[in-house]
Image (cartoon, helix red, strand yellow):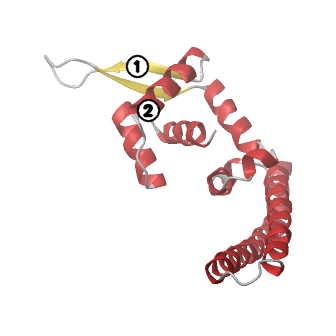
Amino acid sequence: MYSDIMILRGLLTAPKHGYEIKKYMERLTGGLLNNNTLYPALRRFEQRGEIEKIAEEVAPGRPQRTVYRITGKGRERLLALLRTADPQVLVKDEEFQVRVGLFDLLPVADRRRIVEVRRERVEHELALQEELAAAAGHAPWGERVLAFTVERLRLELLWLAELEAVLEETAPEEKALEDEG
């Protein structure tokens, strides 16, 4: 889902050819996107009418190159993917973080639901890790890992509280904009 979101998001600003999409993804994720992942995804999006291929003239006498453009159906698909608040999906850091990074595309209610689902997941994981830490015995390296994990989860809960506070602050502003529109 994550790569689908990123590919469709990359096409929101302007049509791109495959290499541009690949470089966009690599820049955002810090990782490499394999052509065996990218091009099947582009074919799947095209088959569903979510993107369209356009032949673009490069230069006289040179072969045309293919660029991809998102369609209205593709925008709808992107928003549907972003709205997904399935705990099985949001357990993955990148799935949650990509949604937060694109919160400007979602209404406040969807943002709240996504943060709430993630918070519940982190609270559950923290309780499990704290239980493990209490029962760990004296395995110094294991204790270090558990201490790090517990601290990371506590920090994420603080961050989630900040996100919830920002959502509370922005909700009245967005409601006013919706009422005007």
Q: Say few, some or many: other residues with alpha carbon within 10 Å of mark 1 (under 14 / 14 to 19 / 20 or more).
A: some
Instruction: Please give the name of the residue rendered at 61% of the width and 43% of the height, measured from the top-left corner.
Output: 2
Amino acid type, mark 1: Ile
Q: Secondary structure at mark 1?
A: strand
Residue 119 visible in the current orientation: yes
Q: Residue furthest left?
A: 61
Q: Is residue 76 above or below residue 159?
A: above
> Residue 54 — which label?
1
Residue 85 visible in the current orientation: no
Instruction: Please give the name of the residue rendered at 84% of the width and 55% of the height, measured from the top-left corner.
Output: 117
Q: Quadrant of residue 82?
A: top right
Q: Which residue is mark 2?
A: 15
Say which label, 2 or 1, has the lower sequence index. 2
How many numbered callouts? 2
Q: Say few, some or many: other residues with alpha carbon within 10 Å of mark 2 (under 14 / 14 to 19 / 20 or more).
A: some
Q: Quadrant of residue 23?
A: top left
